[in-house]
Amino acid sequence: MTALISRSNREPVLLARKHRSVIVRNFVLEELKMEHQALPNSDGRLDDNLYVVVRVYNEAPVVRDVVVELLSTFINVIVVDDGSTDGTLRQLQGLPIHLLQHSVNLGAGAAMQTGIEYALRQEAKAVIIFDADGQHRVEDASGMYGKFKKQGCDVVIGSRFLGTTTNMPWTRKLILKLAIIFSNLTTRTKLTDTHNGLRLFSRKAASVLNITQTGMAYASEMLHQLVDQGMEINEYPVTINYTDYSLSKGQSSLNALNILIDLFIGRFMK
Ligand SMILES: Nc1nc2c(ncn2[C@@H]2O[C@H](COP(=O)(O)OP(=O)(O)OP(=O)(O)O)[C@@H](O)[C@H]2O)c(=O)[nH]1
Ligand SMILES: [Mg+2]
């Protein structure tokens, strides 16, 4: 496998990662099938077979606070550790969560897919995806759930452009806007924020997802699959905080260019 991972040829890297992704994710789900521990009874928190999936890759400084805050509102929290090497797992010790682990880093899309498949095995009626880096607000997640309960739609996607952002670098905004135009054109959607990490799926919508793309192209792959299966997608205004932490994680705004590169690769390598 290692021999296939070459920096000069992108295709073998993607094929190798995809292949590895299937093996690692199936292994994780099989191993955990029998290990689910009964969690505390609901104490006024949202239960209702609603599961929140937090995928996390090297977020040790903030992940515990993010998960603890979620637990004050949601009883079923699944954390998918995506091969973190920075002590993230230690930060999660003792929390009443469902903890899944990729033995190697597979990317945000694969981590989302693992969490969704696990939630479906727990008979989830709805799944919320929530980032581990402190950029989302718990009240936005519960607001999305309120909209879902009221309208009975298939998918609710957060939109920072209908809501607000704090301290978003202009270069990030520009790249995101280009990615949104491209994703809308290729997926026949009219969304205002195609790459927002805060998402809610009904059981029906979660069941049609089968993310295989590595990198950020998973977001448009997800939209393709939902649109192809006739799922109704709604938006909900949310706040995204560009905190000092999230901006200092080494993901410079120029790195957001990866979104565009991945989008093109994802589109034309199919
Ligand atoms: N970047 C990255 N994030 C991952 C990966 N696996 C899981 N994640 C988690 O996926 C979530 C989204 O990742 P972010 O890098 O914050 O992506 P983003 O919020 O779209 O981009 P930023 O605006 O740069 O924060 C976070 O909770 C990450 O910890 C991975 O391989 N790479
Ligand atoms: Mg983020």
Image (cartoon, rainbow, N blue to C red):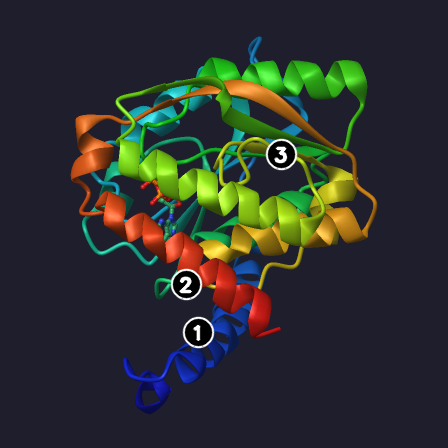
Marks 2,1: beta carbons within 8 A:
yes
Q: Residue at x 50, y 54 (%)?
A: 109
The 10 Å Cα crowd at callout 1, few under 14, some 14 to 19, many 20 or more, is: many
Gap between marks 3 and 2, in whole Å?
A: 27 Å
Kindly identify which residue carries mark 2.
106
Q: Earlier in the sequence, mark 3 or mark 1?
A: 1
The C terminus: image quadrant? bottom right
Q: Can residue 34 be seen in this view?
A: no
View extreme (top): residue: 44
Q: Which amino acid does label 3 sit on?
A: Leu
Looking at the picture, how far across and down is residue 137, in whole percent? 42, 19
- Mark 2 near ligand 1 (CB under 8 Å)? yes
Quarter-wise, where is residue 210 in the image?
A: bottom right
Q: Can residue 227 be seen in this view?
A: yes
View extreme (bottom): residue: 3
Kindly identify which residue carries mark 3.
191
Gap between marks 3 and 1, in whole Å?
A: 29 Å
Quarter-wise, where is residue 153 in the image?
A: top right
Up-down relation of residue 22 to residue 12 (above or below): above
Looking at the picture, how far across and down is residue 12, in whole percent? 42, 84
The N terminus: image quadrant? bottom left
Looking at the picture, how far across and down is residue 103, in whole percent? 36, 64
Up-down relation of residue 253 to residue 33 (above or below): above
Q: Which residue is drawn at 44% across and 15% down?
A: 72
Q: Which of 162 and 115 is in front in this view?
A: 162
Q: Which of marks 3 and 2 is nearer the N terminus?
A: 2
Gap between marks 2 and 1, in whole Å?
A: 7 Å
Kindly identify which residue carries mark 1.
17
Q: Which amino acid does label 1 sit on?
A: Arg
Up-down relation of residue 93 to residue 165 (above or below): below
> In what element is the residue under mark 3?
loop
Q: Which residue is drawn at 18% across and 47% down?
A: 250
